[in-house]
Image (cartoon, rainbow, N blue to C red):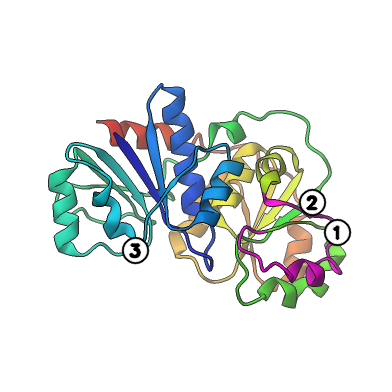
Amino acid sequence: MIHLYAYSNHRSDLDSLRRVGALWHALYARGLKAEILVNDYRAQLAGRELGLPPATTIETVVDIDALAQFGDRVLIDSPEELPVSRLKRFTERFERLCLVRPCGGAARFGERILDPWGEEGPVVDPAYVETGGERSDRRVLIYGDSDYDKRLLQASAALRRFGFELYWGTYFYVKYEEELQRHFPVIHESEEYPELIRESGTVVTAMPQTAVEAALAGARSVWLDRGESVECIGAALERCGARRVVWGDWEDLDVALQESVREDRPAGSLESWIDTLLS
């Protein structure tokens, strides 16, 4: 059995789930079954909107071995730290253990390290890469899945002049829509995410995974750098054709929105990740 664990909580974005979802779709295309593990039911709902099967909810990463059996294959896409004793136990118990680590890292007990921002390119669902159809003139702002500190609202007045349509994040507050709608008259529900990536001419986002999905899908992709990401992520986004704009530099954003879409984009590392998981 293959288990794919994607970290989630109501204060973070769902980049891990989108990478795991790309893996699940690719494995399914090969006729292989995999179980998706997440931390909360809202991530389950988001997964269904990405065309994924119902996930299994667990408390934390250390609970994986309550489900996975001896000889299974496990991929963990999570910032959570595994205790050394548990990591060693996982490598002894599972046929293959893969850990997703931005910017890479060294293995300790024979686990495989997978870097979503390495030279081979990101892990992106083939449904986005193989789009190739007509794109609308729509400019969509996919700020993120969560806005716990209402940072988007604080910048909404400045962003209004760009004519963005807004993606409604999975973890946005229920009554938050009334405040945001004054600045973004068109708001897209979370189930429209795949369509927005495939069909929008311009995608502006603070989520690195969404930025590479949009870039490889052929949209003008602009990544709003809020200063939360490590250096290797910015370099990887640039290789993929996503333009970096520092959060709050709205004049630079204006320039980025006028630039042409880059045609030279990497193929991505989805297949190599699958080969590592199955080897």
Q: Earlier in the sequence, mark 1 or mark 2?
A: 2
Taking the spot 86% from the left edge, 69% from the top edge, the residue there is 182
Is residue 72 left or right of 228 when viewed as pictured? left
Amino acid type for the residue under numbered disc 1: Gly
Tell me the quarter of the image containing the C terminus: top left
Q: Quadrant of residue 83?
A: bottom left
Taking the spot 54% from the left edge, 71% from the top edge, the residue there is 227
Residue to which mark 1 is pinned:
163
For residue 171: magenta? yes
In percent of width and height, residue 248 lies at 69, 74
Identify the residue at the far top of this view. Answer: 31
Q: Is residue 122 visible?
A: no
Q: Earlier in the sequence, mark 3 or mark 2?
A: 3
Number of the front mark, 3 or 1: 3
Amino acid type for the residue under numbered disc 2: Arg
Contact flag, marks 1 and 2 (Cβ < 8 Å) = yes
Q: Secondary structure at mark 3?
A: loop
The span from disc 3 to disc 2 (Cα, nearest Å) is: 34 Å
Residue to which mark 2 is pinned:
139
Residue to which mark 3 is pinned:
80
